[in-house]
Amino acid sequence: MSEAYIVAAVRTAGGRRNGNLSGWHPVDLAAALIDALVQRSGVDPQRVDDVILGCVGQAGEQSTNIARNAVLASTLPESVPATTVDRQCGSSQQALHFAAQAVLCGTMDVVIAGGVESMSRVPMFTPASLAEAHGLGSYRSPELARRYDGARFSQFVGAERIAERHGITRAEMDAFALRSHQRAAAAAACGAFDAEIVPLPVWRRGDAAPLGARHASDEGVRTDASLDAIAQVQPLREGGLVTAANASQICDGASGVVVVNEAGLRALGVAPLARIHHMSVYGGDPVIMLDAPLRATERALARAGLRIGDVDLFEVNEAFASVPLAWLRALGADPERVNVHGGAIALGHPLGASGTRLMATLVHALRRRGARYGLQTMCEGGGMANVTIVERLVA
């Protein structure tokens, strides 16, 4: 059987809402990321068989197949096709899976997979709110409403419920949030992100053109974060546990990987960063929504013939602190192996770009530490979770 390899993995530094990346049109932001992947991998642009990008807010500037528009705005030739994927927060992780499946079966040799989201320009929930405003109805069909009578599909409610189910306290969530900022700040200070970040000109919304400064560090990381300050943030609902401080940050960004098989590897003449060892996706309860990574990870490890202790590093998306905390409690993983460079609470969660953002961080962390196996998973709207296991290859 053929293999699927990652030969390049990069991301933009996270941009805060209305921050350093907010002036970038998301098409051009994705195009800049694509160009960086081509440059980092050394691939002949004519040899790229497809581009698959994840994006959640597919409206306005992110509508009409943003992946194809990004290709047309990039240095890739018009002959390169592209498609856009929506598996909610796991969209670009799913894009990676689709790319790997294509090269594994041999229908393609070189595929770019990634994602983009400008949450400053296309706010979260825009497609649904626009539909409602124009009288186009709701995704909640009569049969869906009948099956889940009275249930509310809300990630915020789910974050509270998963904490309650696993006995997670507000103090634990706040402490986890602090650790995310501390780890991200330490990683940035020691250059751990340098290999994965593509510096871009600062371009804030309202500016006519990019500024001379370069955006090369994640804006959301708080080097002065303290437990006292985090604990003072009011919960999103009265009596709740979830706050803006222990949940992921709204973020602008793009990320991506180049995935190839043996034929693509020979054509490039480069050493791969990692081999894709396992891919799977799982569907769970859409009401609690956010606990799918727990069962998904258990099933993925069993299918891959691995135990939790065999995996050196984990990336579990910090959509809310309660998610990785519940995952840790259920799986019994070593906390020192999980999100070692911080996560979305500090680095931001640019929705459709988060999947390959985590993968870029994971792949480079494995190489930096000389570790072998890495596992990535994330909760997704609708109660789903993707799991990807990669193996670092010795050059």
Image (cartoon, grey):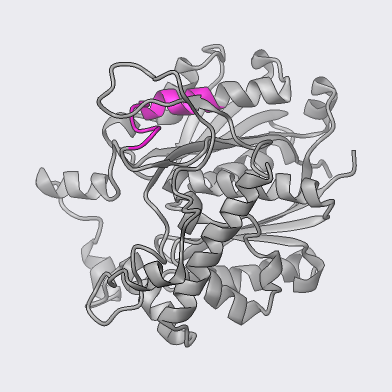
- Is 226 displayed left or right of 310 in the figure? left
- Give percent across and percent down for residue 183: 60, 58
Q: Nearer the viewer, residue 141 or 118?
A: 118
Residue at (52%, 70%) from the top-left corner? 176
Q: Report whether 318 appears left or right of 142.
A: right
Closest to the observer, 376 or 387: 376
Examine the rendered structure and indicate whether residue 373 appears above or below residue 229.
above
Residue at 72 percent of width and 60 percent of height? 313
| Residue at 39% in and 20% down | 211
Question: Which residue: 65% across, 78% down?
Answer: 331
Q: Is residue 280 at all visible to an observer of this figure?
A: no
Write the start and end of the magenta stretch as one range: 19-33
Q: Is residue 57 visible?
A: yes
Residue 155 within the segment the image draws in magenta: no
Identify the image quadrant of residue 103.
top right
Residue 293 horizontal/vertical position (percent): 56, 68
Can you say which quadrant of the picture contains the C terminus? top right
What is the tally of numbered marks visible in this picture? 0
- The reply, left or right, for residue 97 in relation to residue 140 is right
